[in-house]
Image (spheres, rainbow, N blue to C red):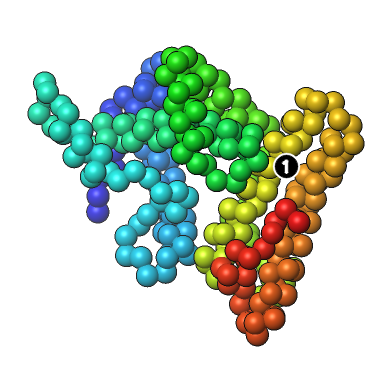
Amino acid sequence: MSKPWATSHVSEVAKGVGIDLRISGDVKETLVSLLKLKLKEITKNMEDETLEKDPNRKTLDDPSRTRLGFNRTRGLMIDEIVNVESVSSAAVIAVNEQLENYLQKILYSASEVASNEKMGTIKQRHLDLVLASSESQNDSRLEEISDNLNLSKDESMNPKFEALTSVGIRNIVKQFSGKKLENDAIDELILLYYDYASDIEYNLQKNITSGDVDKITESYQKFEQLIMLGWMRRVLKTASEKADSQNSNVIKLVHIVSLDPWS
């Protein structure tokens, strides 16, 4: 059996997350026990979700997202260090977090530029505009765009997006179409949903700014339909019909790719 964390180490971790008060010895012991219970719960959930995503996988993964490779990052850091001899795991994790946050800011900003052009794909020109703005304004505009976009998503779209998982899609499919979906088809459907939702959000904000009441009403109606899964119902019905026309009992990637989600 592996040894749990030392109580003294947990105390130091608590300081690192902003706890300045002294922690008594019995509280430290309790915290270690609580962390062990939480670790057990998290690990079991990760194992289940890892195998749901890839039944043949033999290594526990982070099923919620793909992260930068630990060993690749560590190797690159070792190439750069000068006055120390090695790189700890904690340092690699910290650097990966910073790199992923940087990636997120750039891509959020580039996605805003793409949305302004009503594009569903981030092109090189969108990234070039973000980088040019970043260089000319010392990253102030990049931070502003990222913060505004994060705020917008937190206040409006994200609460609805969080329920849109592969499991949720499968349940919706059973209810709306009676067919199974291939994994690739589910991934594509989720991307379409996000793309369509971003387009609606952009148009709604644009129409509010311009004060066009009719357009605002139209965009809001589309937004309501999206939240109430009207869009999903329509798309799945069309995909199911395409599958039927090809005598397929399963909705495949080709049936989703051929859809026009904006029609």
Q: How busy is the neighbourhood of tag 1: few (under 14 within 10 Å), some, or many (20 plus)?
A: many
Task: Where is residue 80? Give x, y as percent.
Answer: 17, 29
Please tell me in which quadrant of the rendered image residue 154 appears. top right
Give the residue at mark 1: 200
Q: Nearer the viewer, residue 140 or 115?
A: 115
Image-quadrant location for residue 221: top right
Q: The C terminus appears in which quarter of the rendering?
A: bottom right
Is residue 160 visible to the viewer in this orientation of the structure? Answer: no
Identity of the residue drawn at 69% across and 74% down: 242
* 47 on left or right of 173: left
Residue 129, percent across and down? Answer: 49, 28
- The answer to which of 102 and 39 lies nearer the viewer is 102
Look at 34% across and 27% down and name the residue there.
Answer: 13
Q: Among all residues in the image, which is located at the extreme bottom?
A: 247
Q: Is residue 250 visible?
A: yes
Which amino acid is tagged 1? Ile
Q: Position of residue 10 (x, y in %)?
A: 33, 30
Above or below, 231 relative to 242: above
Q: Residue at x 41, y 30 (%)?
A: 102
Up-down relation of residue 255 to residue 214 (above or below)? below
